[in-house]
Image (cartoon, rainbow, N blue to C red):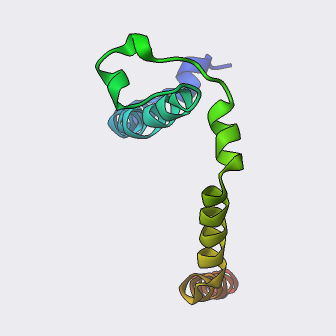
Amino acid sequence: MKSLSKKYFTNNSKAAYLFLAPAISAIGIFFFLPVVAAFMISFTDFDIYTLGDWSTLRFVGLKNYLKLIDDPLFWQALQNTFLLRSGSGAFIYSDIIGSGASVKFETNKV
C-alpha cells in the first residue's frame, strides 16, 4: 500500500498546488481577512478616532445588533433590497433563461 504522501502528492499535484498557492493566498488576504476583521469590529464601538488610539476601543457585544434591529431605516433598506431583487425583471428572466439553457445542455450532450 502506498504511503499517504505518495498517493496524494504526485509530481503533477505538486505543480498544481504551487500554481494554486498565490490565488488561495490572495483570496485569504483580500476576502477572508477583511470579513473576519469586520465581524470582530462589529462587536466594538469602533469609530474613525479609534484608528489613532486603539486604547479607546471598547467591546460592546451585541449592543450594535440590537440597535440595528430597533432602527426603522434598517428594515426599510431590507425591504427595498428584497423588492428590488424579487421585482426586477432582469433577474427573473436571467434565472429562467439560465435554467432553460441548463436543461437544454443537460439533455443534449455536447
In which quadrant of the rendered view does residue 33 lie?
A: top left
Q: Residue 54's image quarter? A: top left
The front one of 19 and 3 is 19
Of 110 and 79, the residue lying toward us: 79
- Quadrant the N terminus occupies: top right
Figure check: 85 above or below 22: below
Please say if 2 is above or below 39: above
> Is 16 on the left or on the right of 82, as rendered?
left
Q: Residue at the far left: name it.
A: 52
Q: Is residue 17 positioned above or below 53 on the image?
A: below
Label total for image? 0
Quadrant for the C terminus in the image:
bottom right
| Residue at point 66%, 79% (across, down) | 86
Q: What residue is at 32 percent from the left and 23 percent from the top?
A: 51
Q: Position of residue 47 (x, y in %)?
A: 41, 31
The spot of residue 2 in percent (x, y) is 63, 20
Name the residue: 55% across, 19% down: 5
Relative image position of residue 73 (x, y in whole percent): 60, 59
80 relative to 47 in the view: left or right: right
Q: Residue at x 65, y 51 (%)?
A: 71
